[in-house]
Image: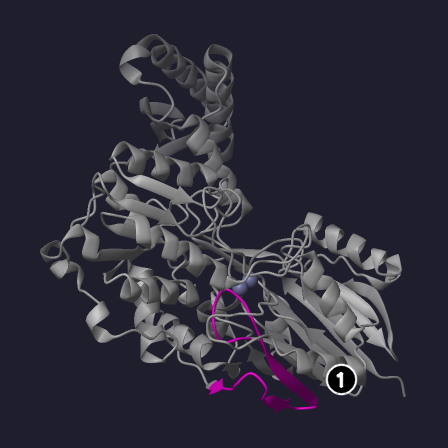
Amino acid sequence: MSEKLTFIPLGGVGEIGKNMYVFQYQNEIVVVDSGLKFPEDEMLGIDYVIPNISYLTENQDKIKAIVLTHGHEDHIGALPYVLKQLNVPVYGTRLTLGLLKVKLEEHKVKAKLYEFKGGDTLKLGKFRIGTFHVNHSIPDSVGLAIQTPAGTVLHTGDFKLDQTPIDNRVTDYYALTHYGRSGVLALLCDSTNAHRQGYTKSEREVGKTFDDIFHRAEGRIIVASFASNIHRVQQVFDNAVKHNRKVAVVGRSMVNYVNTATELGYLTYPESSFVQLEELNKLPAHKVVIVSTGSQGEPLSGLTRMASGSHPRVSIVPGDTVIFSSTPVPGNEKLVSRVIDGITKAGAKVIYQGVADVHVSGHASREELKLIINMVKPKYIVPFHGEYFHQAAFKQLAEMMGYDSEEVFCLENGDVVEFTDGVGKVAGTVTAGSVLVDGIGVGDVGNVVLRDRQNLAADGVLVAAATIDRQNRKLVAGPDLITRGFVYVKESEELMAEATAQVAKALEKVLADTADWGALRGAVRDTLSSIVYEKTRRRPVILPVLLEAKRNS
Ligand SMILES: [Zn+2]
Ligand SMILES: [Zn+2]
């Protein structure tokens, strides 16, 4: 009998975000990660985007577990939504589960959580999953060797090869070469930095730069970073201790991450080096470090509010040194430069990547990718965690190393890859895509609602209200036009008067033939859109509101 292992990405290929990967052997499924993605600019009002999991809800009885590679939002952020639909156990390392618990409590979701350590092997049905430690921009990250009778697929997780990581735990090269020697069918590999030459620098390099900046700074130091980058925060604490300063923490998510990481032992510092925000002003400026959220210029974050003077406890003052210990995620550049403007206007000094080495990536660059391919020697390669451009850069790299074009799969979400008796091919697709989360609504905002929001944002709304006596086919009251975001009514009286008259005429014309609601609404919409477009070249959302006149009985 032929042996088949199926791989389906439900999210995370052709994009950076909402990672979710399905592995199926016979009638058993293991899912790796359940991440979210932050919305694009044109997705007005949307909070998050999560993967469409209809394939999993249809095959719920087959799912053995969800296994998590690390605690970043693009890998665990969709779990509160996913676990409301799927009652399956979740496996993760200590920090990953610690961060997940906070999230599940917020959403009041209960789940069966099982902890493992990098190096452990999980037995899930016919799957044997070897886990191995990898370096990344959050501690306790792992890669997975997914072993089945049909072969082994090695999933790198998000990773880099850091020879001098802050916790001294290097990527598990022994495991990688061990699996490589035993034979790997396919390598699923992080492709985020597949276009970047050389090696990604060690996290420790940032510490050296901090040391230098802390040495020179005379006033307060404010460091903005991703809250999840615990090792970055650790280096802020280490340098604060070294330079005799105390650390205060600003921003809700920074407080959450610092608390969880300290509790679980991933962040260590002498208690005396920590200071509550309320006590901060009692200390002289040269004794203070603030670590804050807002490295992406997020409007409500700690740093943005400090820069605009709207933070209740801390404002930026001349003499402050502000370090952006990150680079803007594509799309956030404008937000970040606006915050930098604000800080500079307030008289502080700003240091960002480019001025000094205050940030390193958590993802492997090209030389590291080559190294991992040479260690694992896979038959096939599937780049994930990348837009098409990153996948293509990875493919080009693999081809340079002697792989054939058919041996590297640049997939789209929903593609089904079958490895049958050691031969891989794309064999179809399943439903995949995006589910939009807005407030407490999951998936109720679709394309139609989004298009309305875009139209409303672009040209506003025009409401035409009228009361109709349908029995006698007469217009009893109105039409009245009400608008928001379309024109300023006081300056457009002429247009509004003309539009009102035309709508009345159109309604009377229809009423001569019929009292059908559809025909009446259609007449209002057509009349208004044509006169409005003719006079203004705008296309507001038009809402006819027609009421039945109350009859005396
Ligand atoms: Zn990550
Ligand atoms: Zn990621």
233 lies above or below 70: above
Residue 506 percent location from the top left of the image: 46, 18
Q: Is residue 116 toward the left or the right of residue 9 in the image? A: left
51 lies above or below 46: below
Residue type (three-letter) at the residue carrying disc 1: Gln
Q: Which residue occupies 58% across, 70% down?
A: 163
Q: Is residue 424 toward the left or the right of residue 326 in the image? A: right
Q: Nearer the viewer, residue 460 or 409?
A: 409
Q: How many marks?
A: 1
Residue 267 percent location from the top left of the image: 36, 73
Q: Which residue occupies 46% across, 85% down?
A: 112
The quarter of the picture where residue 431 lies is bottom right
Q: Nearer the viewer, residue 297 or 286?
A: 286
Quarter of the render that holds ligand 2: bottom right
Q: Which residues are magenta?
A: 114-141
Q: Is residue 133 magenta?
A: yes
**Is the C-beta of the residue carrying label 1 under 8 Å from the nearest atom of ligand 2?**
no
Q: How is the protein colored in the picture?
A: one colour
Q: Residues within 10 Å of mark 1 (few under 14, many from 20)?
A: few
Q: Secondary structure at mark 1?
A: loop
458 lies above or below 114: above
The quarter of the picture where residue 59 lies is bottom right
348 lies above or below 538: below
- Residue at the disc numbered 1: 26
Quadrant in which the N terminus appears: bottom right
Q: Would you say residue 430 is visible in this rendering? A: no
Residue 512 percent location from the top left of the image: 47, 21
Q: Is residue 179 toward the left or the right of residue 350 in the image? A: right
Q: Is residue 494 magenta?
A: no
Quadrant in which the C terminus appears: top left
